[in-house]
Image: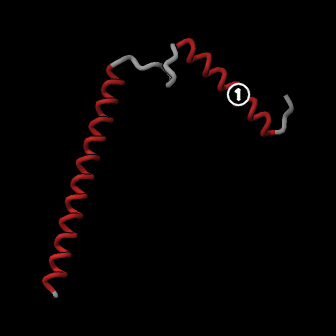
Amino acid sequence: MMSEQLLIAACSLLGLVVLAMATLKGWQGWLDLKERELALRSSRHAPEIEGGASEGAARIELSDLKERIRKLEAIASGVDL
């Protein structure tokens, strides 16, 4: 009776160790993939904004966002535009 429980416990522990090692290997592979993506992205000239727009378009988009923020701040303070 005791040897059966010991065998089940040992097998469960071994299974848990195998599962943990497989998960760790997968995690390391995912981290390696992300490192390669970052290295590839940094080796090229990264665009100024995420959408891949040129510098001029990025500045236009930035000024548009600033204008939207000003409008939202005016709305929040109760000023009617």
Location of the N terminus (image quadrant)? bottom left
**Front-most of residues 44 and 67:** 44
Residue pictured at 58% horizontal, 17% vertical = 59
- From the top left corner, tell me how far across and down residue 46 is, in percent: 41, 20
Q: Quadrant of residue 65?
A: top right
- From the top left corner, tell me how far across and down residue 56 is, in percent: 56, 11
> Which residue lies under the disc numbered 1?
68
12 horizontally vs 42: left or right:
left
On screen, residue 58 above or below 3: above
Helix, strand or loop for disc 1: helix
Residue pictured at 26% horizontal, 41% vertical = 29
14 horizontally vs 69: left or right:
left
Q: Quadrant of residue 16?
A: bottom left
Residue pictured at 15% horizontal, 76% vertical = 7
**Front-most of residues 19 and 76:** 19
- From the top left corner, tell me how far across and down residue 75 is, in percent: 80, 36
**Front-most of residues 67 and 24:** 24
25 horizontally vs 78: left or right:
left
Q: Quadrant of residue 34?
A: top left
On screen, residue 77 above or below 2: above
Location of the C terminus (image quadrant)? top right
- Most distant residue in the left direction: 3
60 horizontally vs 23: left or right:
right
Amino acid at dot 1:
Arg
Residue pictured at 23% horizontal, 48% vertical = 25
Question: Mark 1, residues whose alpha carbon is within 10 Å: few (<14), some, or many (≥20)?
Answer: few
